[in-house]
Image (tube, grey):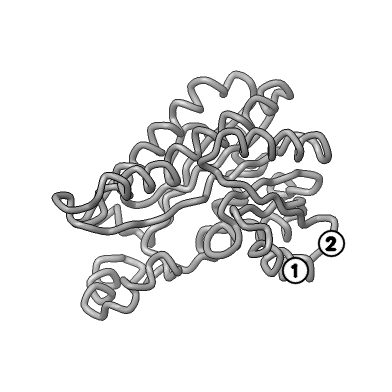
Amino acid sequence: MTSFDLTGKLALVTGSRRGIGHAIARAYLIAGARVVLNCPDADRLEPAAAELRTLSAPGNVLTSAFDVTDEAAVEAAVAELTAEHGCPDILVNNAGIQIRGPLTEIPVADWRKVVDVDLTSAFIVGRTVARGMVARGSGKIINVCSVQNHLVRPTTAPYAAAKSGLGGLTRSMCAEWARSGVQVNGLAPGYLDTDLNASLVGDAEFSAWITSRTPAGRWGEVEDVTGPAVWLASAASDFVNGQVVYVDGGLTAVI
């Protein structure tokens, strides 16, 4: 079981102030890693960091505030982090947003915003961190995808397109960096009870449909993603590469 131990590893998790990213950061901390929390606003990061510092030595929880869609900001932040603490051993590209609307009506600006945050940011942050991983000869990158890599529903076209693209980017990263000792995989959560899905959780009809079509018979929780996230960040998954792992209670297996 020591192959799942993350002691001594440094993990950068984007979009980790709350939700899935925060839960993954917490799990990495418990598994022994030092974690770097990220969101664009430094002040909003501090409460999240303070919570995690109660679980470990304060020096094991770091923060790095930058906009994941801003190439210059990403490069500056990663350079600063690397200079002070070394290149991250683990990167989780988790930052994401959702803007719903009919395809015939959704503004192009909203489409571009979703694609920038949900897909292009993983390209920008991923390749910036990967340069150090490739030079070192090791690293783990986990791209947080979605069941909408595989399934879609009306009004979610920008999100579905971006997440489907993220699955393709995951495979492309694997193809280019695997020989350098870097494993790149995707985690695809199903319908989780998060802030991003608050409107869906509150929709009784939709919620009943989800629970009836999911073999597990319930909405997922952010904690359901943390075990697979630790596995993909650890030595236990060293021969797993270019895969998208669905954590969906069986939804994509039967629908």
Q: Amino acid at mark 1?
A: Ala
Q: Position of residue 162 (x, y in %)?
A: 35, 42
Image position of 179 with respect to 228: above or below: above
> Residue at the location (81% across, 34% down)?
83
Q: Position of residue 4 (x, y in %)?
A: 69, 48
Secondary structure state at the residue bearing disc 1: helix
> Residue at the location (57% across, 29% down)?
127
> Residue at the location (58% across, 38% down)?
141
Q: Is disc 1 surrounded by few (<14), some (14 to 19) or many (20+) residues within 10 Å? A: few
> What is the quadrant of the C terminus in the image?
bottom left
Q: Amino acid at mark 2?
A: Pro
Q: Which residue is under mark 1?
A: 50
Tell me whether the residue at label 2 lies in contact with that at label 1, contact meaning CB atoms closer than 8 angstroms: no
The image quadrant that residue 219 belongs to is: bottom left
Q: Position of residue 163 (x, y in %)?
A: 37, 44
Image position of 96 with respect to 161: above or below: below
Q: Position of residue 56 (x, y in %)?
A: 81, 64
Q: Nearer the viewer, residue 25 or 14?
A: 14
Tell whether 101 sits left or right of 96: left
Q: Which residue is under mark 2?
A: 58
Tell whether 69 sits left or right of 153: right
Tell whether 161 sits left or right of 205: right
Q: Nearer the viewer, residue 230 or 177?
A: 177
The image quadrant that residue 206 belongs to is: bottom left
Number of numbered labels in the structure image? 2
The image quadrant that residue 133 belongs to is: top right
Q: Nearer the viewer, residue 195 or 3?
A: 195
Secondary structure state at the residue bearing disc 2: helix
> Residue at the location (34% across, 58% down)?
250
